[in-house]
Amino acid sequence: MSHNTFGHLFRVTTWGESHGPALGCVVDGCPPGIALTAEMIQAFLDKRRPGSGKFVTQRQEPDAVRILSGVFEDERTNGQRTTGTPISLMIENTDQRSKDYSEIAQAFRPGHADYAYFAKYGVRDYRGGGRSSARETAARVAAGAVARLVIPGVTVRAALTQIGPHAINRDNWDWDQVGENPYWSPDAAVVPVWEEHLEKIRKAGSSTGAVVEVEAIGVPAGWGAPLYGKLDAELAAALMSINAAKGVEIGEGFASAALTGEDNADAMRRGPDGQPMFLSNHAGGILGGISTGQPVVARVAFKPTSSILIPRQTLNEAGEEIDLRTKGRHDPCVGIRGVPVVEAMTACVLADAFLRHRAQTGG
Amino acid sequence: MSHNTFGHLFRVTTWGESHGPALGCVVDGCPPGIALTAEMIQAFLDKRRPGSGKFVTQRQEPDAVRILSGVFEDERTNGQRTTGTPISLMIENTDQRSKDYSEIAQAFRPGHADYAYFAKYGVRDYRGGGRSSARETAARVAAGAVARLVIPGVTVRAALTQIGPHAINRDNWDWDQVGENPYWSPDAAVVPVWEEHLEKIRKAGSSTGAVVEVEAIGVPAGWGAPLYGKLDAELAAALMSINAAKGVEIGEGFASAALTGEDNADAMRRGPDGQPMFLSNHAGGILGGISTGQPVVARVAFKPTSSILIPRQTLNEAGEEIDLRTKGRHDPCVGIRGVPVVEAMTACVLADAFLRHRAQTGG
Amino acid sequence: MSHNTFGHLFRVTTWGESHGPALGCVVDGCPPGIALTAEMIQAFLDKRRPGSGKFVTQRQEPDAVRILSGVFEDERTNGQRTTGTPISLMIENTDQRSKDYSEIAQAFRPGHADYAYFAKYGVRDYRGGGRSSARETAARVAAGAVARLVIPGVTVRAALTQIGPHAINRDNWDWDQVGENPYWSPDAAVVPVWEEHLEKIRKAGSSTGAVVEVEAIGVPAGWGAPLYGKLDAELAAALMSINAAKGVEIGEGFASAALTGEDNADAMRRGPDGQPMFLSNHAGGILGGISTGQPVVARVAFKPTSSILIPRQTLNEAGEEIDLRTKGRHDPCVGIRGVPVVEAMTACVLADAFLRHRAQTGG
Amino acid sequence: MSHNTFGHLFRVTTWGESHGPALGCVVDGCPPGIALTAEMIQAFLDKRRPGSGKFVTQRQEPDAVRILSGVFEDERTNGQRTTGTPISLMIENTDQRSKDYSEIAQAFRPGHADYAYFAKYGVRDYRGGGRSSARETAARVAAGAVARLVIPGVTVRAALTQIGPHAINRDNWDWDQVGENPYWSPDAAVVPVWEEHLEKIRKAGSSTGAVVEVEAIGVPAGWGAPLYGKLDAELAAALMSINAAKGVEIGEGFASAALTGEDNADAMRRGPDGQPMFLSNHAGGILGGISTGQPVVARVAFKPTSSILIPRQTLNEAGEEIDLRTKGRHDPCVGIRGVPVVEAMTACVLADAFLRHRAQTGG
């Protein structure tokens, strides 16, 4: 991970600000010969798109992705295929309301990246958060759509497991529920609770945190490059790099601190097919930084959005003490939109791990 | 992070197995002119060294570090100084008991990296865990000692905040206590509780997890390179790459998921010195991936060691179902030794962030 | 250098094919606060643009560059400034004649990348050479324009010193001549010779090689990162990566093989200003991979274009032996257009070296 | 290539100064399961070793290499095998004569890296040239020995083709001759000419330049990663990073500038085996940055060593003008010892290209 590029062999470089003319990414290192169309990427962008529920930001943009390079089609290719050259993806910003930014132009929103960017660069594009806007995650989702095609045997899927203080009941977990409610909840029972909580938060002009859980099924044993390219270390970096992420855990995660060795270690037996089988998955599918063949499981904690309507004490660039409330559209719970982003980053990490594994071992 | 190298500009490449002739690292990119002697590194290695308490592994090695390159001294240098060329550090393995490995040579210890390494590489150095041994962390600690010298204004210090189910009482936090007990506890009151718990674990031939908290004081605002070299993303990768780490959080971390925006965002006022001052530190000193000038705070969850005396169901390389107990020395709580390692990795990440910041901004 | 990214801290990722919708690059790591407009980049693109002479390809494209991200302007910034975030540059391909590619679609042009791309990827965008087209160098020139702004004290300029067998007379060297003829010749006397040679080549449907020399003035002593990031090694990679480049030399280059130590080593004396002064520059401004403060001097050999009208023996994808002549527009001497590209790559390497030097030494 | 690491997937990090306790390298990313012993590496080090002829430096060191990590042997591995973990190689410096360095300690040898290192770092290990010593190439040769094992189907071999003004007669080229004379000459006829020239140079206390040519046979079509990881760009960087290298060319190289397109492009026909066959190899086995299946051919120009006995004008650190002659052992022709180093770097680049190719294409 280097500034605006992530990945080693499946390399994604993203660019763009919230209110610039466009944003996008360059995906480099993608294998050749993979069927890829804009529509295949668009499907994932539509899933991420704000405006699908009333508790995500009301910005209305089609987020239409264009593929500018890296694909080719003629009568012999059986549809459009990747060529092994860099894939440039662009999404134009069509909804850049030229609204009045005079207030935040000179003020640091508490809990936002405003102050840190200013301290670092001495100049900042404050419009809509500029580079630190969650809008940049559209580029991640687009890249993730490509990544999935690199590892066709792997299914990456995420769900929301907590909003504010309300966690799901894991006994109710049903992946089929995830697409049936606007919060990606795998537990139908918690949906009305979340709805009520979000309504309260929205009315108060406040925001709330959330937790997303992701799993990747079909990852074979052997992916991951110890010691510093460990699969869990790469996942941790990728997930922590998402806007508003404040924690990442793998498998049992923080709960493992309270366990004993015999309760935490996953015993092995031969499965019905004679293959190695684990009797539990406290490890979250990763041991020694290498995948074990079990589902890879991670969780990400998202903090509550800092852009809220409740006035907060802060400073402006001149160093004066002011009270600031962030007007305009905002997400009461940015974690909801984090679900497809967590999936995308996980897919990118796995595609990269696959290529690295193939490089070193041929497999 | 690329296989066995971490860092971008302050680059550390580690090498070595538990039972090979030696282990070490190459530190590349260190600024020139810094006073550096083996003794300055040794002090941190001694702190990490097992055998300082009865609840860490009984392996007795001096862990004497040698500097093989990258330093120079003559009458004009005022002691030995770094030259800007790669610093090679080596620690010989003097205590490689040539014991009987016949059992684990062909068996996969449950919860250990054995199976994953075998699945990946088809060959593995099983002696003492080989490359996946916690012994490798000696090289990290050595590198961390150099990293601290690159950022002399920054203090990095860690403490243990939980062993098994027993967390400290944060109201008792006293940094002066940390060096006063063998568990790096900042809470004197919890020490007897931990002691009893560890004794029970040890007698049972079991192991227990733990949580380490680290803080870095003196980090100026502006370090970190969004979007994928974010300071928190780099920290997450570095800390998750430590043996047995299963979770990383920054500032409020997972608890932030339950908060509201107004409770989580850190308000700002001018401090007594007229400088920007935060009224709280839920952010853990990082916003938008960039340091804010507040203390950088992170926590790492360590799982219980997988090498335990309690027999566990597993397989051997031939695929046969066996029951295995791991004989020999082992750590009942690897998290204890994790404390200096967490400090070292944090120091390395910060040294790297400093150099990257200086490159782009001159600051 | 990694696939489609070059540079370490001043990182340029290029993308695009000759006949895709657009091409461009992402410049990452650029310092903030630098005045940058599309016009400033356009000036260099216009210089590179084909069609300025009759001996460069007749493709007529405005090559209008757009800045899609990484800059910001408000009343406080004194014009548009870089923000420290990735700068995305895009040039649309407006002149993609949908001509008949049926012949080369299945044939490998001798001396061209056709066969190698096909062997590597199994699929290739043959239209106009696809990714291997010299058109990609527009993105390099755009990036180079930004690089120059990062090192404002450095002047990078190049000239053509040989076309086919006709070298310039170095005694006639006059930098002011370079812009006065369509061949970037510093020697006015050679221009009619080259003109005649090119006319002959063009009429024959043939092509010719060339040599470009670049110098960078104002590079202070100390840039370059031994041992593998040596300034000359980075330059060699950057220049050899240009289409049709087959050789790179620094300073005395290949001629140094014939010299003795006393003739080759540049003696030093104090200059009129009391500063260290070299009495010659056989080293080309680089010793031990580090700049010495003298002008950095390099030369690049360009082979003759492989796309010629003279029929040549080759194979098609089916493995059949055919004779092929490449129809359509082509460059009789691609080296001419190489001049601004060599400048651009040199500027990028120096900007990167500057940032790396500043990171490690503060200077 | 980043400071002291070269390669992307086959990564070599070297360390060590001429007069430190040791030097060495860490080879990371090597595939597992490869038979590797110290003896296999030693064979190549012995070839490089100074002292095999009277025209290479008289330093007498066994250059005994030790493998400190990354290999394992038990009854199942059929000898010692790589494990996929980093391979640490160390060569102790046994011949560090603690001679009098008082003169060069404060003086800059003309043509040497002394001044540049001092300008960059402000401190330098002047003993024997420190990090800039040709002694570091021992680590490269050791790494190259490992690289060869990664690409067992490829033969990498080099020869000296020019010493001073005396080039070989290419019509006499005979690879079998290369090992039969102390100068790696493929032309037996030139040996007495070189001998006489070197004797004259040695007596004069002077030095001479040289040219090395390398070829790699058995490289399949498809290696190389355009556009900036082109095989020729990587080779150029690797070869230019060798001490005293001032020029690199591929295939026809600088001579291609004088050719026409029809003379330079290599025509293709089907070979006797029905496979694609080139009728010439002006390209040096690389087109578009990708290998074509022909031998990869490159040449490197080495300047004459700067350490000579003839007094030269220079400065000391205090800025005073002095005349300096470099006492002690030195190479009259460093290019001779460059032969195994050029081979090693070429092998490393090819091993890296192979792994990268396998990553992206599976091949």
Image (tube, coloured by chain):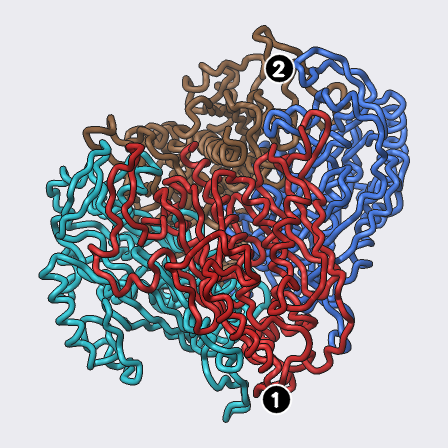
Chain colours: A red, B cyan, C blue, D brown
Toward the viewer: A300 or B151? Answer: A300
| Mark 2 → mark 1, Cα distance in angstroms | 74 Å
On the image, the x and y values in percent for residue C303 come to 72, 29
* Chain of residue at mark 1: A
Question: Viewer-nearest of labels 2 and 1?
Answer: 1
Toward the viewer: C248 or A116? Answer: A116
Q: Is residue D312 left or right of residue C60?
A: left
Farthest left residue in view = B203
Disc 1 residue crowd, few under 14, some 14–19, many 20+, Cα 10 Å: some
Residue D115 showing in the rendered view: no
On the image, the x and y values in percent for residue D300 come to 56, 32
Q: Is residue B66 left or right of residue D53?
A: left
Farthest top residue in view = D272
Residue A49 showing in the rendered view: yes
Identify whether B328 is placed above or below B100: below
On the image, the x and y values in percent for residue D162 come to 55, 26
Q: Which residue is tagged 1?
A: A323
Identify whether B110 is placed above or below A119: above
* Numbered label attached to residue A160: none
Identify whether C210 is placed above or below C29: above
Residue at 54 percent of width and 77 percent of height? A111
Q: Secondary structure at mark 2?
A: strand
Q: Secondary structure at mark 1?
A: strand
Amino acid at dot 2: Pro
Q: Which residue is tagged 2?
A: D276
Amino acid at dot 1: Asp
